[in-house]
Amino acid sequence: MDEQSKRASGWIYPGLRIGEALEVAEQEGGLVLICNRCGHVYGPVSRDPKQGAVYREVPLAEVNPLNALSPRDDMVCRQYFCPGCAVMISTNVHRRGDPHLPDMELAPPEANESSSAAG
């Protein structure tokens, strides 16, 4: 399948931009997610990019002063950053200590091909 056909079919392809800071790139091992500002590799497209990021937890009142009025003090804003250039790639609100939740899971084209062939 040529590049134009891949783009038209909605497949994941090198150069596909995801949000403001993530992009799909091709490496020897397959398709990966990279920072489109500094080139940091987050990992394969099948893995959530937050696993290759750094993060910090801040009180909700730091994000917006109105949050200081909340009766809950166990909630935090978890901000995820590129370890190469510090651009923020994601932010989530969690209870302090909760596990990280994935933002996305992308299936590489090979997975799309095999599921199409099976169905």
Image (cartoon, rainbow, N blue to C red):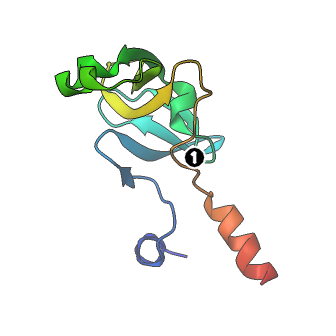
Task: Find the residue positioned furthest to the bottom.
Answer: 119
Q: Of residues 36 and 88, which is closer to you in this image?
A: 88
Q: Position of residue 70 (x, y in %)?
A: 32, 26
**Residue at the spot 54% in from the left edge and 26% down from the top edge:** 52
Q: Position of residue 42 (x, y in %)?
A: 52, 31
Horizontal side, residue 34 vs residue 47: left or right: left
Q: What element carries label 1?
A: loop
Q: Residues within 10 Å of mark 1 (few under 14, many from 20)?
A: many
Horizontal side, residue 107 vs residue 118: left or right: left
Q: Of residues 15 and 89, which is closer to you in this image?
A: 89
Q: What residue type is labelled 1?
A: Val
Q: Position of residue 89 (x, y in %)?
A: 37, 33
**Residue at the spot 35% in from the left edge and 16% down from the top edge:** 59
Q: Is residue 90 above or below residue 118?
A: above
Q: In this view, does 43 lie above or below 62?
A: below
Residue 4 in which image quadrant: bottom left
Quadrant containing the C terminus in the rendered view:
bottom right
> Which residue in the structure is indicated by mark 1?
45
